[in-house]
Amino acid sequence: MGVKRVITLSDLPASLGVQTLASSTDGVMDSVYFLDDDRVVKIFETASEEAVAEELKLLIHCGSLHVSRAEGGVFRVQNKPALIYRRCRGESLKDAGIDEIRQIGAFLRDFHHLTAGRRSTNERLFEKSRLARMIRETHTDIFDTLLKKNDLTLRDEGIIHGDLFLDNALFLEGRLSCVIDFTQACNGDFLFDLAVTDLSWCDSDEKTEALLKSYGATLTLDEFRPYREYATLFYCVNRYLNGGNYQELLEKLV
């Protein structure tokens, strides 16, 4: 999260009683400000008001977990949908150790338990048909070849986070304190969600095995490989289209 638009106190409802406003320095997708050191306002630059309402509904449903705590409902700032959250304490990790990986695996297990069978009105962002459309936009043959090599059949098991990279989890004194940024949450395959986490958190088979065990998955590394490859390809193409560094991910696939 970070800042893409400049706002002042006058842009916020007076009923919030905000005295100080400080911009976040992290992230690039949305605009995030700290309010009086105990609250956060997030202004969604691309998500619709309906999608933001879906996030709010999901956070309420998963309130028993270490997730962002939203206050009030969706409102608008400079004609963009916005939400206010209680400020989460902690910091994101640069690298994850085995203990942190076990904690995030257990979180994802509990999150999927709560979201199994639930329906989201959000677009299913991670479907193969959508990835195929994204690949056509790149006009890059290697992406198309890699997709055709992957015969994975994705299931619709419930709502997934879809973006549980290291920077979307906070730790305080070695313990998971909050998982944030459910903007891309939509219906999808739970093992794909686990593979996205593996992509960011695990740099060895030992760490991947710890993730699978803490999640409660019984599949082998070989059985998990198609999910890992699909998640890697998805975010490789996503970065390519958004001008990010995709080469590191591509090297994992070729």
Image: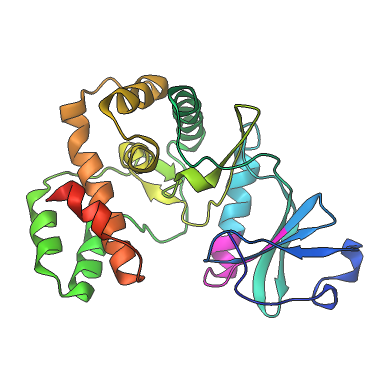
Q: Residue at x 81, y 52 (%)?
A: 37
Q: Residue at x 53, y 66 (%)?
A: 28
Q: How is the image coloured?
A: rainbow
Q: Is residue 22 left or right of residue 194?
A: right
In magenta stretch: residue 148: no
Pinpoint residue 253: horizontal percent, then vertical percent. 16, 49
Q: Would residue 4 be visible to someone looking at this image?
A: yes
Pinpoint residue 101: horizontal percent, then vertical percent. 44, 28
Q: Is residue 221 left or right of residue 14?
A: left
Q: Would residue 127 be visible to someone looking at this image?
A: no
Pinpoint residue 8: horizontal percent, then vertical percent. 80, 76
Q: Which residues are magenta?
A: 41-52
Q: Nearer the viewer, residue 51 or 209?
A: 209
Q: Nearer the viewer, residue 212 or 205?
A: 205
In magenta stretch: residue 49: yes
Pinpoint residue 25: horizontal percent, then vertical percent. 63, 61
Q: Residue at x 50, y 26 (%)?
A: 103
User: How many numbered circles does the render carry?
Assistant: 0
Residue farthest bottom in this picture: 78
